[in-house]
Image (cartoon, rainbow, N blue to C red):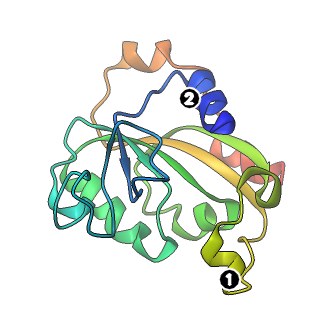
């Protein structure tokens, strides 16, 4: 929770809805769940609601990333992705405009192991955890000037 507050404050981006959360893991008042949950929006999951003009918080299952990026293209929105660095490398060509990338550090120090990971004796993903602010919305030039300095993608790759 503290890491997310630091990230949202630093990026000056405050998500309105937590996609792929549960009642106990949600980080916003509004959330969508992969499980049946009366409190969640979108009775049939996150893909059943309209994402247009929403500020999304996404910490998705990795296998859903291509589908998420396709939906963002169809329904323009701005999203804060929380994902492993290798995952961004794998899907970088599918991502819409990347506004900023923050390296949060090693996954083991950023994420907590949940009960299901412990019970199945699974490990957290390797590498560093990233916060990636991206948008599929058309931005005016003056809006881009108000954002924090953009991290150049190639600079990020060269510093790895």
Label 1 Cα crowd, 10 Å radius (few <14 / some 14-19 / many 20+): few
**x 29%, y 41%: residue:** 77
Quadrant of res 2: top right
Q: Earlier in the sequence, mark 1 or mark 2?
A: 2
- Work out whether 158 lies above or below 91: above
Label 2 Cα crowd, 10 Å radius (few <14 / some 14-19 / many 20+): some
Q: Secondary structure at mark 2?
A: helix
Residue 147 placement (x, y as % from top left): 51, 19
Residue 145 placement (x, y as % from top left): 48, 14
Residues at marks 1 and 2, CA–CA distance in whole angstroms: 31 Å
Image quarter hosting the N terminus: top right
Q: How many marks?
A: 2
Q: Nearer the observer, disc 1 or disc 2?
A: 1
Give the left or right position of residue 73, taking residue 93 as reference: left
Residue 124 placement (x, y as % from top left): 72, 71
Q: In this rendered view, identify the residue nearer to me: 159 or 65.
A: 65
- Work out whether 157 lies above or below 91: above
Residue assigned mark 2? 8
- Work out whether 159 lies above or below 120: above
**x 39%, y 53%: residue:** 23
Image quarter hosting the C terminus: bottom right
**x 69%, y 48%: residue:** 154
Quadrant of res 7: top right
Residue assigned mark 1? 119
Q: Secondary structure at mark 1?
A: helix
Q: In this rendered view, identify the residue nearer to me: 125 or 122.
A: 122
Numbered tag placed on residue 30 in the rendering: none
**x 78%, y 64%: residue:** 127
Q: Residue furthest bottom?
A: 120
């Amino acid at each position: 929770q503290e890491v997310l507050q630091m990230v949202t404050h630093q990026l000056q981006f405050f998500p309105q809805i937590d996609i792929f959360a549960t009642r106990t893991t949600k980080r916003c008042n509004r959330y969508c769940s992969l499980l049946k949950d009366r409190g969640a929006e979108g009775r049939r999951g996150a893909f059943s609601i309209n994402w247009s003009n929403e500020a999304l918080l996404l910490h998705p299952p990795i296998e859903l990333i291509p589908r998420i990026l396709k939906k963002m293209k169809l329904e323009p929105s701005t999203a804060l992705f929380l994902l492993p660095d290798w995952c961004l490398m794998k899907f970088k060509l599918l991502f819409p405009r990347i506004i900023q990338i923050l390296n949060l550090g090693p996954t083991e120090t950023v994420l907590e192991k949940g009960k299901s990971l412990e019970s199945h004796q699974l490990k957290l993903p390797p590498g560093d955890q990233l916060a990636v602010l991206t948008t599929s919305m058309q931005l005016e030039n003056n809006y881009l000037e108000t954002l924090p300095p953009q991290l150049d993608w190639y600079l990020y790759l060269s510093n790895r």
